[in-house]
């Protein structure tokens, strides 16, 4: 009898270990899935809200001379074919004085990765649905202007990358002096 109880105890402990290993595997897989879902959508901005503004303000506060912030991890948006995506950016008026500054901005595709099956920057520009250009934006000294560029990725878009430049101009037109520039990359992912 003594021996029989030992075998039962051994079988119970092996069963327990197997259950623990399976449970830990499921926990890790669940955490990876949740992290993937949240990191993909954290920078997809449909509208400017207080949370996005505070994140942008943190970036500005890290560098007092920074004029333009693109709210993307590593300035890269990975967008699936057929999806809509919003990219937030903000610029601030670092000029001194008491009068509001007048600014304009333009967002345009400037480069396509090699092997993009004939995709041109003009075709990549057509992904922009809203927020491509704005003129006559008044920003007080030390003030900040927030906006969103909305992109719609057609399902037929080839799997490639495009670089978009954001140019902010001093003045009420896009022919004025360039105030600041930045960029973001769009990487097209399969549906």
Image: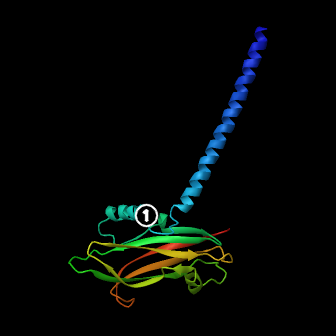
Q: Residue furthest left?
A: 97
Q: Residue furthest bottom?
A: 175
> Dot 1 surroundings within 10 Å: few (below 14), some, or many (20 or more)?
some
Q: Position of residue 15 (x, y in %)?
A: 73, 28
Q: Secondary structure at mark 1?
A: helix
Tell me which corner region of the image, top left, top right, bottom left or bottom right, holds residue 41: bottom right
The structure residue drawn at horizontal position 59% and vertical position 47%, both measured from the top left corner, is 31
Q: Position of residue 40 (x, y in %)?
A: 56, 61
Q: How many marks overall? A: 1
Q: Position of residue 187 (x, y in %)?
A: 58, 71
Give above or below for 129 relative to 30.
below
Q: Name the quarter where the C terminus is drawn.
A: bottom right
In the rendered view, how is the structure colored?
rainbow
The structure residue drawn at horizontal position 70% and vertical position 33%, both measured from the top left corner, is 19
The structure residue drawn at horizontal position 69% and vertical position 77%, both measured from the top left corner, is 156
The structure residue drawn at horizontal position 65% and vertical position 84%, both measured from the top left corner, is 118
Tell me which corner region of the image, top left, top right, bottom left or bottom right, holds residue 2: top right
Q: Position of residue 168 (x, y in %)?
A: 38, 81
Q: Residue furthest top?
A: 1
Q: Nearer the viewer, residue 2 or 80?
A: 80
Give above or below for 28 relative to 97.
above
Q: Nearer the viewer, residue 190 or 112?
A: 190
Q: Name the quarter where the N terminus is drawn.
A: top right
Q: Is residue 73 left or right of residue 117?
A: left
Tell me which corner region of the image, top left, top right, bottom left or bottom right, holds residue 151: bottom right
Residue topped by disc 1? 52
């Amino acid at each position: 009898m003594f021996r029989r109880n030992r075998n039962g105890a051994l079988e119970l402990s092996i069963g327990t270990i197997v259950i623990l290993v399976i449970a830990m595997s499921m926990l890790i897989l669940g955490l990876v899935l949740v992290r993937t879902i949240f990191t993909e959508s954290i920078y997809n901005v449909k509208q400017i809200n207080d949370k996005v503004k505070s994140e942008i303000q943190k970036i500005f506060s890290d560098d007092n001379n920074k004029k333009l912030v693109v709210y993307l991890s590593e300035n890269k948006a990975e967008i699936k074919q057929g999806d809509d995506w919003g990219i937030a950016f903000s610029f601030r008026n670092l000029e001194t004085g008491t009068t509001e500054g007048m600014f304009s901005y333009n967002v345009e595709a400037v480069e396509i990765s090699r092997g993009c099956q004939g995709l041109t920057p003009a075709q990549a520009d057509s992904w922009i649905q809203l927020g491509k250009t704005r003129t006559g934006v008044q920003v007080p000294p030390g003030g900040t202007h927030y906006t969103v560029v909305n992109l719609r990725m057609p399902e037929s878009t080839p799997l490639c990358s495009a670089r978009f430049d954001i140019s902010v101009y001093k003045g009420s037109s896009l022919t004025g002096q360039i105030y600041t520039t930045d960029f973001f990359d769009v990487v097209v992912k399969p549906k």
